[in-house]
Image (cartoon, rainbow, N blue to C red):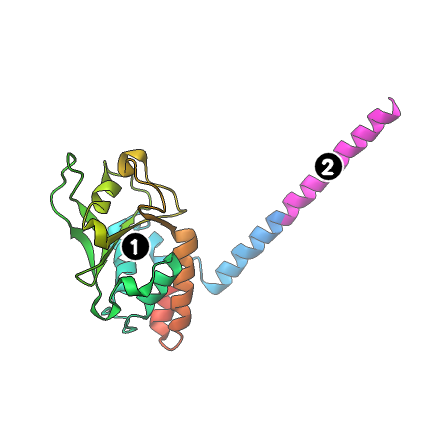
């Protein structure tokens, strides 16, 4: 075996050993994280227990809508809504917070695929003049012309938000020629909702039941 072959062999063995060490360290970190979650009781997830993890409207939309509602049972007024608008980059002045209300599965008329209108908006925030329409997608697929239909509703006074687990864009069948971020906003549970809920938890420090429920 030549000296160069020995050097290559030694290099490969070194890389293999480093790779195994990295895997071992990663495994230890993951196991430590799992143990911390167990100790804190964070493995208890009511959505999982009730088999409602993927029921957008019955669980996630209902919960998010209640927090966003200035007249919600949280009794925090407009605080959570203000934080949400800030996180997703919409100025507070767009919605008159003192007159804002939230409606789930808001009907905007019968579906008309020809004119690309109608449907039901998952979370609808309005002050009667301006509107924020949130389409909440977890595992469900897009409907035909869904985002187009929502964007065509009160076009000049309505902003459409497309919420998914990881910020995935809607399908071409749903958005047509509309452009992400220009014609509608893309937000995710992973980034925007988690950041928002963290802020809501901080604001709820004086109300333990609300704080722990959000957490």
Does the magenta run of residues contain 16? yes
Viewed as shown, does residue 65 lie left or right of 42? Answer: left
Q: Quadrant of residue 85?
A: bottom left
Residue 61 in the image: state x and y as whole percent. 27, 55
Q: Quadrant of residue 96?
A: bottom left
Q: Is residue 213 visible?
A: yes
Quarter of the image for residue 69 reads bottom left
Task: Locate the N terminus by quadrant.
Answer: top right
For residue 20, above or below residue 154: above
Q: Position of residue 68 (x, y in %)?
A: 28, 63
In this rendering, would 11 be left or right of 197?
right
Spot occupied by residue 80 in the image (x, y as percentages of width and height) = 33, 67
| Coordinates of residue 12 in the picture (x, y in percent) | 75, 32
Q: Which residue is identified by label 2? A: 15
Q: Report the magenta residues as a range.
A: 1-25
Q: Nearer the viewer, residue 167 or 175?
A: 175
Q: Is residue 38 magenta?
A: no
């Amino acid at each position: 075996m030549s000296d160069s072959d020995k050097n290559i062999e030694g290099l490969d063995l070194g890389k293999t050993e480093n790779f195994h060490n990295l895997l071992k360290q990663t495994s230890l970190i993951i196991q430590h994280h799992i143990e911390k979650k167990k100790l804190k009781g964070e493995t208890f997830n009511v959505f999982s227990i009730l088999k409602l993890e993927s029921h957008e409207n019955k669980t996630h939309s209902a919960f998010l809508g209640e927090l966003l509602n200035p007249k919600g049972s949280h009794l925090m007024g407009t605080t959570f809504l203000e934080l949400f608008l800030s996180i997703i980059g919409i100025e507070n002045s767009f919605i008159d917070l003192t007159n804002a209300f939230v409606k789930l599965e808001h009907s905007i008329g019968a579906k008309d695929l020809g004119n690309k209108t109608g449907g039901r908006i998952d979370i609808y925030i309005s002050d009667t003049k301006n509107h924020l329409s949130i389409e909440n997608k977890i595992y469900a697929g897009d409907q035909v012309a869904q985002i187009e239909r929502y964007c065509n509703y009160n076009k000049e006074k309505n902003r459409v938000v497309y919420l998914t687990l990881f910020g995935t864009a809607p399908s071409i069948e749903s958005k047509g020629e509309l452009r992400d971020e220009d014609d509608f906003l893309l937000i995710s549970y992973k980034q925007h909702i988690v950041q928002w809920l963290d802020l809501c938890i901080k604001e709820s420090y004086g109300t333990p039941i609300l704080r722990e429920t959000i957490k």
